[in-house]
């Protein structure tokens, strides 16, 4: 299916699926999910309540204690089970859930029992894909599921949770409906000229187009902040050899990630880690010390350090305050001045000081002194947008592209109207905006796009 279609066009006669929904390691509790038309029949074949009726006779969302059978019929585990009938379930289908002890062996054998009873292995994201196709959520909500799983900061989790609750849908549904009303009015007048329908005058919709343009502009403007929130800021730690770059990385991470010695040139390649500093997710790179050297390996490391600085969204320029200024320090300072954002740090404040660049924050990577000031400086460089409610910050490139296209079409429609173009020319642009917004929410989206989205998910989600 290569052309746009609504979600019913993607659905087939669904079978019953099952998957482990929790991690692969040892844990106190492990969960197996089942969804599909035979979910209740399948769970009845493998799970026997200790008291009372089978699960297919139980009310929705009642936790029941019972015995889970191994593939051969022997007792595998004493666990809890619950069922939820469609359409009032996560997937919109009949579903069941087994809450077992978290042994990977128990979960694997429990899953094999379900397969023997008629279920099949769920694919990555298939539970949420069925929820989307069965109209339990739109595409922005479905994508918020994986964003919530992947969230690395409090702000990212809060934003994803609000999107899962439908924040983007609520923000854009009004635009979609108002644009659809324009198209409907126009076609009604054209198709039913003898009916008593109010004449179509494009100018009467100028306010509608203006409001739609403003709303889409504000929404699309959040994507830059959303990219930082979700993916983090490329951050390079620069400094001459022995300035304390690896020690600073270790101090920020809270553990010994990089090798630290008194020998200049110890770090010969880039070391990359992710850390949250000042509430900002940083993709940190500890680089080789900036200096001139005849060592070919170290020289390659210095070249990589310069490359990391050129591609960084933030540079932490580190200087040794206990030693005199050098030519290498001046080169680091020049690189920091070229960066989009930079924080100057004067390290080794626990030792007698010889110099400090203007505006540098005094720190000691060894003792941790000054790290709070560093956090505050980073937070100030990437301020949160307090005026934008959680959930209305775009973090997804697909969504941002769809909003940008919708904005372009709405803007073109308004300009065509102001330029005196005939209504059908304006309506062409309005219909383009509707298509883009339909792709944003999943009202109208190609199957290959949908499959690509859900391929990012974990199995069991």
Image (cartoon, rainbow, N blue to C red):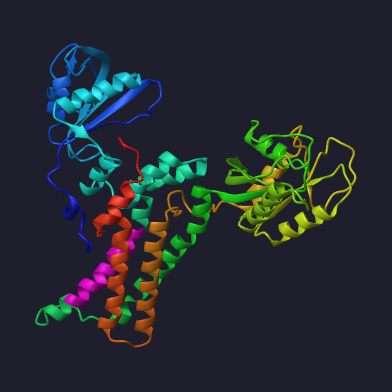
- Horizontal arrangement in the rendering, residue 46 relative to residue 327 (left or right): left
Can residue 18 be seen here? The reply is yes
The residue sitting at 71% across, 50% down in the picture is 296
Residue 87: quarter of image: top left
Compared to residue 156, the image places residue 203 above or below, namely below
Q: Position of residue 192 (x, y in %)?
A: 11, 78
Between 298 and 351, the residue placed more toward the observer is: 298
Q: Residue furthest bottom?
A: 420
Q: Is residue 151 left or right of residue 432?
A: right
Q: Position of residue 258 (x, y in %)?
A: 66, 36
Judge left or right: residue 27 versus residue 427. right
Could you tell me if residue 62 is visible in this image? no
From the viewer's perspective, is 225 left or right of 31?
right
- Say whether residue 285 is magenta: no
How many badges with numbers are in the image?
0
Of residues 381 and 414, the one nearer the viewer is 381
Asked if residue 175 is among those painted magenta in the image, a careful observer would answer yes
Question: Residue 335's spot in the image, x, y percent?
Answer: 72, 58
Segment colored magenta: 172-187
The one nearer the camera, 240 or 212, is 240
- Furthest residue toward left: 194
Q: Main secondary structure of the magenta part?
A: helix
Q: Quadrant of residue 91?
A: top left
24 or 126: nearer the eye? Answer: 24
| Residue depicted at x 39% and y 48% | 163
Which quadrant is home to the N terminus?
bottom left
Establish if 120 lies above or below 287.
above
Residue 202 appears at what percent x and percent y? 29, 80
Name the image quarter holding the C terminus: top left
């Amino acid at each position: 299916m290569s052309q746009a279609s609504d979600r019913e066009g993607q659905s087939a006669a669904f079978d019953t699926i099952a998957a482990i929904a929790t991690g692969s390691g040892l844990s106190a509790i492990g969960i197996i999910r089942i969804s599909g038309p035979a979910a209740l029949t399948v769970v009845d074949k493998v799970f026997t309540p200790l008291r009372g009726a089978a699960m297919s006779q139980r009310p929705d969302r009642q936790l029941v204690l019972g015995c889970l059978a191994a593939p051969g019929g022997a007792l595998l585990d004493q666990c809890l089970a619950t069922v939820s009938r469609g359409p009032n379930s996560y997937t919109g289908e009949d579903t069941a859930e087994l809450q077992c002890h978290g042994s990977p062996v128990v979960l694997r054998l429990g899953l094999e029992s379900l397969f023997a009873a008629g279920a099949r292995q769920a694919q990555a994201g298939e539970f949420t894909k069925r929820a989307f196709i069965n109209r339990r959520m739109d595409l922005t909500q479905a994508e918020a599921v994986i964003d919530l799983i992947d969230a690395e900061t409090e702000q990212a989790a809060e934003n994803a949770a609000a999107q899962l609750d439908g924040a983007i849908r609520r923000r854009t549904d009004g635009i979609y409906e108002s644009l659809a009303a324009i198209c409907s009015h126009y076609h009604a007048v054209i198709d039913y000229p003898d009916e008593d329908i109010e004449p179509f005058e494009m100018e009467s919709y100028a306010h509608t187009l203006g409001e739609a343009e403003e709303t889409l502009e504000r929404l699309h403007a959040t994507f830059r902040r959303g990219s930082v929130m979700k993916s983090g800021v490329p951050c390079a730690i620069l400094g001459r050899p022995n300035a304390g770059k690896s020690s600073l990385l270790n101090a920020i991470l809270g553990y010994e990630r990089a090798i630290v010695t008194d020998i200049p040139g110890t770090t010969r390649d880039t070391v990359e880690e992710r850390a949250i500093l000042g509430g900002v997710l940083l993709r940190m790179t500890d680089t080789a010390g900036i200096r001139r050297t005849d060592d070919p390996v170290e020289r390659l490391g210095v070249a990589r350090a310069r490359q990391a600085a050129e591609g960084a969204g933030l540079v932490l320029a580190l200087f040794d305050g206990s030693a005199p200024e050098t030519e290498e320090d001046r080169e680091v300072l020049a690189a920091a001045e070229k960066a989009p954002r930079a924080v100057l740090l004067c390290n080794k404040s626990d030792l007698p000081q010889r110099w400090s660049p203007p505006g540098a924050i005094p720190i000691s990577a060894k003792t941790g002194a000054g790290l709070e000031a560093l956090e505050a400086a980073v937070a100030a460089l990437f301020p949160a947008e307090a005026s934008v409610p959680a959930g209305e910050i775009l973090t997804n490139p697909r969504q941002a592209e769809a909003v940008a296209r919708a904005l372009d079409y709405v803007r073109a429609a308004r300009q065509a109207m102001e330029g005196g173009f005939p209504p059908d020319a304006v309506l062409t642009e309005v219909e383009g905006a509707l298509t883009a917004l339909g792709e944003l929410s999943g009202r109208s989206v190609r199957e290959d796009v949908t499959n690509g989205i859900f391929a990012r998910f974990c199995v069991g989600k």
